[in-house]
Image (cartoon, rainbow, N blue to C red):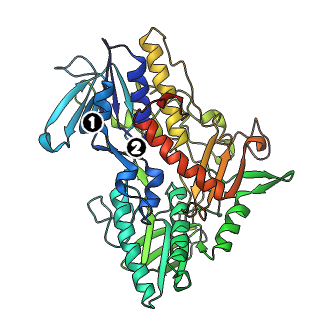
Amino acid sequence: MARVVVMGAGVSGHTASTFLRDWLGSEHEVVVVTPNSKWNWIPSNIWVGVGQMTKEEVTFDLAPVYAKQGVDFRQAKAVSIHPEGSADEKKPYITIEYTEEARAGESEVVTYDYLINATGPKLNFDATPGLGNGSGQLGPNTVSVCTADHAIHANQELQASIAKMKKGERQRFLIGTGHGMCTCQGAAFEYIFNIEFELGNAGVRDMADITWISNESFLGDFGIGGLHIKRGGYAASSRLFAESIYSERDVSWIIGAHVSKVEKGKAHYELLDGSTGVQEFDFAMLIPPFAGVGLTAVAKDGSDMTADIFAPNNFLKVDADYTPKPYEEWTAADWPRTYQSPKYDNIFAVGIAFAPPHLISKPMSSPNGTPINPTPPRTGMPSAMIGKAVAMSIRDMMEGAKEPTHTASMTEMGAACVASTGKGLFSGTAAALTVYPVVPDFDKYPGLGRDLDYTFGEIGLAGHWIKHILHHLFLHKAQLKAGWKMIPE
């Protein structure tokens, strides 16, 4: 009998564990360790954040889903990895600390034959003073849509602002990234335009000043260095695509910005040219930077070996080229293919939990040395595809394969993104974009780095319908309902 332990139950971890349980015989175990009792379809949190969906519509309880499928579910936080075992425990194992109310604080050792790190990110609010509360949580100065509970609070604050506008009090909205090294510009992009849309529906759009603030050096970078869209035989930049949306919706922007401090009603920032400024607000939603969750790794003799298998940002190192080199020397070959640890062949990392070898966008910093550039997105469709590929490799290795059998390189992977810009059955819109590959390959596609035949974008009502349909499809798939395996990642 073999045991696969999956740390995390987000998009990538849930994908890996559910497919493994479906493929492996009853003689093998699949264990999922996650501190959360619920699964959250995070892309729809932005709709919770404007009151268009409830928490119950974007989450479900994990325990009954895993119980039905035969997955051993531990509602607990993974604390440390012991890839060589210890003097007392010969097999490799992890230590966990339960968060389940009945066993809160209780610790346990869980041995494994294969380990998948799908822990996702730590929301590093405290990286920006005033964005966090000093204890790692969201502070009182802004709101967030990173979790369903955050989004509920965001909508409460939004409704309070709308009530003030209806009484004649003008409101200033600031949405974007809260640090120079943030990723997930897409979530903030969706939220700012959903707010703009809802203010129009409430009849108070003329009482609002809406500003976008981002670490992108140009609108439409999205952490992937931007893209070009084939239109009428020409390659149109995502910068033009994005700028037209912001201009049409009367949303101003501050770009190339590192938010250095947040106070009540004020965001202090530094720009790429070294200048500084302050943006005042009545309502702000600023995405925090991500870091690894802080797992430690311990050698057999008890010594700390965290730096051996984790990058400095606490994400797990995989089969990528982490050699420091100039931007001009970065290539598609630097990116991982199998997501296997180079030190331990039974450890993998999927989704946000793996350490990228470098940025996708061009690295930039201010004259003061402050890095101001988006970090690589690894969410949604790429996360699910990576999770499934790793699951297939582990299945085959359990059946005798000597090495990973499946790959999911982001340099050979296309992705589709449907970004909501307002929810309404007949009035809603969304920007539908596809990109291939996610990480540009300038050797294979000279000039633009991507295949224009598979990279395109449109905005309109059809995009909104697609977004809404995908919401229901992916929740159906995640709950393992009839035909779940037929729904693509």
**Of 380 and 298, which appears nearest the observer?**
380
Q: Which residue is mark 1?
A: 63
Q: Residue at x 34, y 44 (%)?
A: 60
In the visual, does 99 lie left or right of 484? left
Residue 453 appears in view: yes
In the visual, does 115 lie left or right of 473? left
* 130, above or below 6, in the image: below
Residue flagged by tag 1: what amino acid is it?
Ala
**Of 323 and 393, which appears nearest the observer?**
393
- Identify the image quadrant of residue 211: bottom right
Judge the density around disc 1: few (<14), some (14-19), many (≥20) Cα neighbours within 10 Å.
some
Residue flagged by tag 2: what amino acid is it?
Gly
Report the residue that reaches farthest toward the bottom.
Answer: 168
- Identify the image quadrant of residue 282: bottom left
Q: Are marks 2 and 1 in contact (CB under 8 Å)?
A: no
Q: Which residue is mark 2?
A: 120
